[in-house]
C-alpha cells in the first residue's frame, strides 16, 4: 500500500514538472512574439559583397534562339513587302498584279520564300484565305536588295492579295506568313457608247445643209439655162428683123 502511494506521488510530481515546463515555453514564445511586433525592426548588422562578372548577349534577339544560335536551315535573309500594284480609286480589269520585297537581312541563297495569290471574298482584316490563283517562289532579283513577283496572266474583276510564307528555320514571332494589302479590280466598259439623242440633231442638220446646197446649185443651173434661152431668143428676133429689112430693100429696088 505504501508502495502504491509512493508511485502515485512520483507520477503527480512528473505531471507538475511537465506542466510547468509547457507553461514556461508558451510564456517565452508569447513574450518573444510581442517583442518582435512592438520592438525596433531595423537590421542589427550590415554586410555587402561585390561581384564582378561579364555577360554575353546576342547581337540580334529577333533572329536567334535563347543560346544566340542561328538555325542552319535559314540563310538569314529577311524579306518584307515594299511596293505592290496600286489599285486605289478605280482600276479596270484585266490587270497583271505584282509585288516588290526588300531584303533587310543577309543575301538570299538557299532559303525558299513561297508566295501565293489569293482571290478573297472581302477585304476586311485580318485577311482570310481564298482561292489560290497562282503560286511560286521569290527568286527574281531586280536590285541589290529588291525582289519582285508578278502574275503570269491578267486578273479578272475581284479582290486579290499576295500571301508570303517565311522559310524553314526563320524565327517567326508567332506568325509564319505575311499578307500584302488587298487589291480590288473593277469591271469597266471599255467601249464608249454615244447617246442617240446627241447624234440625231447632228445628222439631221447635216442632211438639211446638204439638201439646201443641192437646191441652191439646182437653182443656179436653172438660172443659167434660162439666161441662155433668153439670149438665144433675142438673137433669133434680131436676125428675123434683119431678114425682113433685107427683103423690103430688095422690093424697093425692083
Image (cartoon, rainbow, N blue to C red):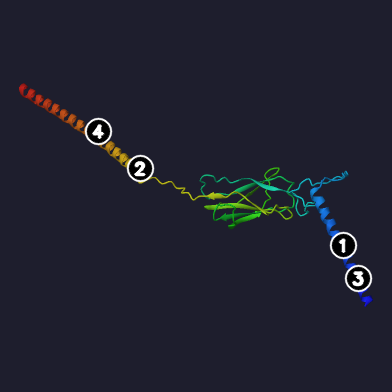
Real-space Cα separation, disc 1 to disc 4, in angstroms: 158 Å
Give the image location of residue 43, x and y in percent: 84, 46
Residue bearing the label numbered 1: 20
Name the one closer to the observer, 246 or 23. Answer: 23
Q: Which residue lies most toward the top here? A: 253
Mark 2 lies on a secondary structure that is: helix
Real-space Cα separation, disc 2 to disc 1, in angstroms: 125 Å
Which sits earlier in the primary sequence, circle 2 or circle 1?
Answer: 1
Q: Is residue 170 left or right of residue 155?
A: right
Real-space Cα separation, disc 1 to disc 3, in angstroms: 17 Å
Quadrant of the rendered structure where residue 175 is?
bottom right
> Compared with residue 209, is residue 74 higher up or lower down, i.e. above or below?
below
Q: Is residue 194 left or right of residue 34?
A: left
Q: Which residue lies most toward the front here? A: 2
2 and 4 marks in contact (CB < 8 Å): no
Q: Could you tell me which residue is drawn at 89 percent across and 69 percent down?
A: 12
For label 2, count other residues whose C-alpha is less than 10 Å away and answer few (under 14), some (14-19) or many (20+): few
Q: Which residue lies most toward the bottom here? A: 1
Give the image location of residue 7, x and y in percent: 92, 73
Residue bearing the label numbered 4: 220
Mark 4 lies on a secondary structure that is: helix
Give the image location of residue 194, x and y in percent: 39, 45
Mark 3 lies on a secondary structure that is: helix
Mark 1 lies on a secondary structure that is: helix
Residue bearing the label numbered 2: 198
Amino acid at each position: 500500500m505504501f508502495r502504491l502511494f509512493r508511485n502515485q506521488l512520483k507520477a503527480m510530481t512528473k505531471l507538475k514538472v511537465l506542466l510547468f515546463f509547457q507553461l514556461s515555453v508558451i510564456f517565452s514564445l508569447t513574450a518573444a512574439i510581442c517583442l518582435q511586433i512592438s520592438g525596433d525592426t531595423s537590421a542589427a548588422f550590415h554586410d555587402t559583397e561585390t561581384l564582378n562578372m561579364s555577360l554575353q548577349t546576342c547581337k540580334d534577339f529577333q533572329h536567334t534562339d535563347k543560346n544566340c544560335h542561328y538555325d542552319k536551315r535559314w540563310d538569314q535573309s529577311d524579306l518584307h513587302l515594299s511596293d505592290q500594284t496600286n489599285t486605289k480609286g478605280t482600276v479596270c480589269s484585266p490587270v497583271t498584279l505584282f509585288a516588290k520585297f526588300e531584303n533587310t537581312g543577309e543575301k538570299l541563297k538557299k532559303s525558299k520564300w513561297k508566295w501565293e495569290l489569293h482571290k478573297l471574298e472581302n477585304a476586311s482584316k485580318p485577311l482570310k484565305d481564298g482561292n489560290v490563283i497562282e503560286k511560286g517562289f521569290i527568286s527574281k532579283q531586280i536590285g541589290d536588295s529588291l525582289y519582285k513577283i508578278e502574275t503570269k496572266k491578267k486578273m479578272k474583276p475581284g479582290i486579290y492579295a499576295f500571301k508570303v510564307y517565311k522559310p524553314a528555320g526563320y524565327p517567326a514571332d508567332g506568325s509564319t506568313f505575311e499578307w500584302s494589302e488587298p487589291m480590288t479590280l473593277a469591271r469597266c466598259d471599255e467601249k464608249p457608247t454615244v447617246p442617240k439623242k446627241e447624234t440625231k440633231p447632228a445628222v439631221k442638220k447635216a442632211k438639211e445643209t446638204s439638201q439646201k446646197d443641192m437646191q441652191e446649185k439646182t437653182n443656179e443651173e436653172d438660172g443659167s439655162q434660162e439666161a441662155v434661152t433668153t439670149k438665144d431668143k433675142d438673137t433669133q428676133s434680131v436676125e428675123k428683123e434683119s431678114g425682113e429689112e433685107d427683103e423690103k430693100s430688095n422690093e424697093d429696088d425692083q
